[in-house]
Image (cartoon, rainbow, N blue to C red):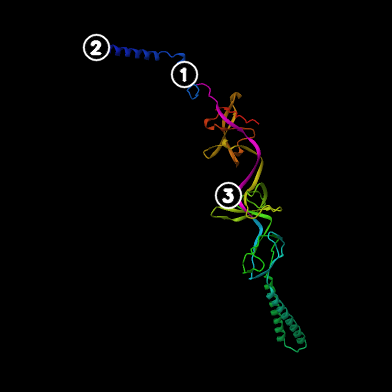
Amino acid sequence: MASKFLYPVIAVVGIVAASGAAWWYQNKTPTATNRASAGPASGGAPAAGGPARPVTVEVAKVQIMKLTDDAQAVGSLRSRQGVMLRPEVSGRITQLNFRDGERVRKGQLLVQFDDQLQLAQIKQSQAELSIAQANHKRNQELLAQNFVSQRSLDESAANLEVAQAKLALAQATAARLKILAPFDGIAGIRNVNVGDYLKDGTDIVNLEDIDTVYVDYRLPERFQTLLKSGQKATVELDALPGRRFEARVQAVDPLIDANGRSIGVRASITNQQLLLRPGMFARVSTVFGSREKARVIPEEAIVPQGGRQFVIKLVPGPDNDGLVSQRVPVTVGIRRPGQVEILEGLKEGDTVVTAGQQRLQRDGSPVRVLELSRPAN
């Protein structure tokens, strides 16, 4: 019965003894392997008092290039002069003296309405004028001989003026039955034919002067102090891909649109080849100025902080034994996709960090430049 309890007691004592031996073995004087594992942490932090490990960064140099200060907008082309020809009076068309799409000259007769009645009124008025002139002349001679009174002469003079007015009215009425080209241009596609009876105000044909075309567009109000007549602009058209046209600012609207806070601009484009047509969609770039030797860096090199702009420049370290970081405030100028101009803070040839800035928390941190592989030619 005693042996029944003796075996479990011996087993427990053996387990306790083995555990104590294991604890003693693990906590005795560290071996070379233990000392090696007590070195720098797995993250690469240096041991206390050791040199800082260089931070790997990507860099770019300050480049010199030509930059243009401009603003982008969209607009539409329109004719230098354009008009829809409409009759002032009702009538029937007897002549159409132009073809669709034909160039016409100023003063050319384009449309003639039936004017037989008006021509007859002109002849009648001319006859009445002749009679009035003869009567007035006769009264002048008779008054000189005292055969008529001054009143008779005054009446004949008044009748003469009435006859002249009636003739002028008949001629003006007949002239309104002729539609003349108001300027040199190209006729559009007519909406009428010979024999049509038109009421006053009916559309006949459009006339466009497109030797020079205008492009109308709008810019934000912040550009209103930069806009001036005569400035250059470049125009690109979806209808003519790959072509660029030079334009000149013709006028700037003095009124700023209160809804969009934008200002209207009109520029002119020479169109001697007649490639440009009114109504085309245009992309306009208005040029405010250009700089031949602008200092440019990649946009990702800019580090905004507290409302200011900084870059991290690489400079030689102590004793010229490597490169270290230096935070430099800069003033930026013109921005382009992926690029930004530096007005102050850097000079040509300076090297700035473009990737890895977040690991450079203080000036003087050693860095190692990552050499990016270049694609084979």
- The image shows residue 6, relative to residue 324, as above or below, that is above
Q: CA distance from mark 2 to mark 3?
A: 101 Å
Q: Of the two numbered discs 2 and 1 on the same chain, state the one appearing first in sequence.
A: 2
- Disc 1 marks a residue whose amino acid type is Ser
* Coordinates of residue 274 in the picture (x, y in percent): 69, 53
Regarding mark 3 in the picture, which secondary structure is present there? Answer: helix
Disc 3: which residue: 222
Q: Is residue 326 left or right of residue 21?
A: right
Inspect this view and state whether residue 131 appears: yes
Q: Quadrant of the C terminus?
A: top right
Residue that protrudes farthest toward the left in the picture? 1
Disc 1: which residue: 37
Q: Nearer the viewer, mark 3 or mark 1?
A: 1
Residue at 70% x, 84% y is 155
Q: Of the two numbered discs 2 and 3 on the same chain, state the one appearing first in sequence.
A: 2
Q: CA distance from mark 2 to mark 1?
A: 49 Å
Q: Nearer the viewer, mark 2 or mark 3?
A: 2
Q: Residues within 10 Å of mark 2 (few under 14, many from 20)?
A: few
Query: Front-most of 62 and 13?
Result: 13
- Disc 3 marks a residue whose amino acid type is Arg
Contact between labelled residues 3 and 2, with CB atoms less than 8 Å apart: no
Q: CA distance from mark 3 to mark 1?
A: 64 Å
Residue at 66% x, 42% y is 291
* Coordinates of residue 126 in the picture (x, y in percent): 72, 78
Disc 2: which residue: 4
- What is the span of residues highlighted in magenta in the rendered image? 49-77
* Coordinates of residue 117 in the picture (x, y in percent): 68, 76
